[in-house]
Image (cartoon, rainbow, N blue to C red):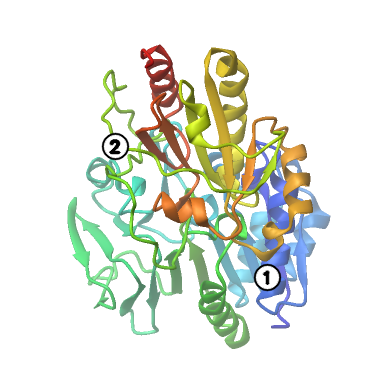
Amino acid sequence: MDAPVAILPAAAAPDNNHERAGRNGVRWFHSLGASHVDLVPVIDKASANDPLLAGRVRSKRLIYLLGGFPRHLAESLRQSLVWQAALQAYADGAVIGGSSAGAMVLCEHYYDRQAVELLPGLNLLPACCILPHHNTFGGHGSAEIAQQLPASILIGLDEQTGILNDSSGTWRSYGAGQVTLYRNGLPLAQPPSATFRLDESEAHDCECRFRASSLRGFSGFSSRAARKIQCSRTIQYCTMKRIAGTVLLIGLTACATRTTASATPTTARATPTATSDMTTPSSIQTALPDLGPAPELTNSVWLNTDSPLRLAALRGKVVGLDMWTFDCINCQHVIPTLRRWYAAYKDKGLVIIGNHFPEFPNERDLGNLKQAVAQDGITYPVAQDNDGATWWSYSSQYWPTLYLIDKRGHLRYIHVGEGAYDETEANIKTLLAEAYP
């Protein structure tokens, strides 16, 4: 794929993750066969108005917005020289795409879950609003959002699901899940492989070919090879054909998932809660259910501890087990809170363990893991889980997922994704206060 690619990392700048996310993006596009990938250092409003950076964007055939913080991204690009250059390239047949926040802000509206409000997007796709991860946390509050946007179509995308529009305006869904369309506030679920039209009247006058998907694992460009192939074909088709007005959207807002079938669960499991501080807050639990004995840890390679840890030897302690991988941006967002909890409660009986289950090949390297642990300032124990023994024993599906294990070694709480920090901390305190034995 010889078409030149520009990667804009502005959305990852608020937590100082733009350099790492950008490097991951370059590596990801190289893995797809792209030979000319330019990480353009647009990180704020000032850099978005740099004429030299705008010139670099103008010359590209694929302009890709990384994920992170949608509001910062939208405010940085709006009415900027870089965005004007992107639109000029788009008018000449370039592809504009985005993951997570990048996908959200390309629509007329996006829902900022941190501010809990609808905000104006860049309006490349009029009368549209993407709700990625619709079958998990992304669908929270969708009915209320639909009521606030009666003239728009909300597109709820399940995990591992995409939609593709042909030149006639007919759409087809691809992947494992379904697409939910909200028209006039009413949801209509489209089954896998269904064909449909987004707007029978075409009132939004969106003539473009539109690529959208909710491929977990694409955030931070940590994606499985099978999904790379699918996305690669889409990108190559768009860029080689040079279709005027092509948009590629990767609709992500949080953690990654595996597509491989998981092992049979070995413990009783409640449906993982997916609430977060970026969604409508839920009430903090005062009594936590007993989800059964937690599977034992069998990892042999550990960092930040003199010997391998086992739950049987941690009776009387509360254990927070974090499933993570170092190139996942959502995992990176959670780490500062895990560090804070570890510092605040380790002397009161809390043990935090980071179970590192890699997705990218480079994440399997112990030296790279050590470097990431040092760079992220992680001082709590980290277990390398390259074979996925611990991941699968907990029937994990998402990065990050946090399991709270009580003093008796029983699972008591599961949280998927970012957020819910106040709720989780309250549950930690509850478990620390429980009597033992």
Q: Is residue 275 above or below residue 92?
A: above
Instruction: Depth check: give the residue in front, 323 or 253.
Output: 323
Give the mark, 2 or 1, whose residue is nearer the N terminus: 1
Q: Residue furthest bottom?
A: 241
Q: Is residue 310 above or below residue 301?
A: above
Q: Secondary structure at mark 1?
A: helix
Amino acid identity at mark 1: Phe
Residue at the spot 53% in from the left edge and 57% down from the top edge: 388
Instruction: Depth check: give the residue in front, 228 or 286.
Output: 286
Amino acid identity at mark 2: Leu
Residue at the spot 55% in from the left edge and 84% down from the top edge: 237
List the residue tagged with mark 2: 291
Q: Is residue 395 above or below residue 87?
A: above
Q: Which mark is residue 16?
A: none
The answer to whether the residues at label 2 and label 1 have Cβ atoms under 8 Å apart is no
The spot of residue 420 in percent (x, y) is: 42, 30
Task: Report the quarter where the N terminus lies.
Answer: bottom right
Q: Secondary structure at mark 2?
A: loop
The spot of residue 118 in percent (x, y) is: 38, 39
Separation of residues labelled 2 and 1 (CA atoms)? 41 Å
The spot of residue 139 in percent (x, y) is: 30, 48
Q: Which mark is residue 29?
A: 1
Can you see residue 79? no
Q: Is residue 197 left or right of residue 337?
A: left
The spot of residue 177 in percent (x, y) is: 31, 66
Instruction: Depth check: give the residue in front, 294 or 25.
Output: 294
Residue at the spot 35% in from the left edge and 41% down from the top edge: 274
Task: Report the quarter where the C terminus lies.
Answer: top left
Camera-side mark, 2 or 1: 2
Q: Is residue 308 left or right of residue 35?
A: left
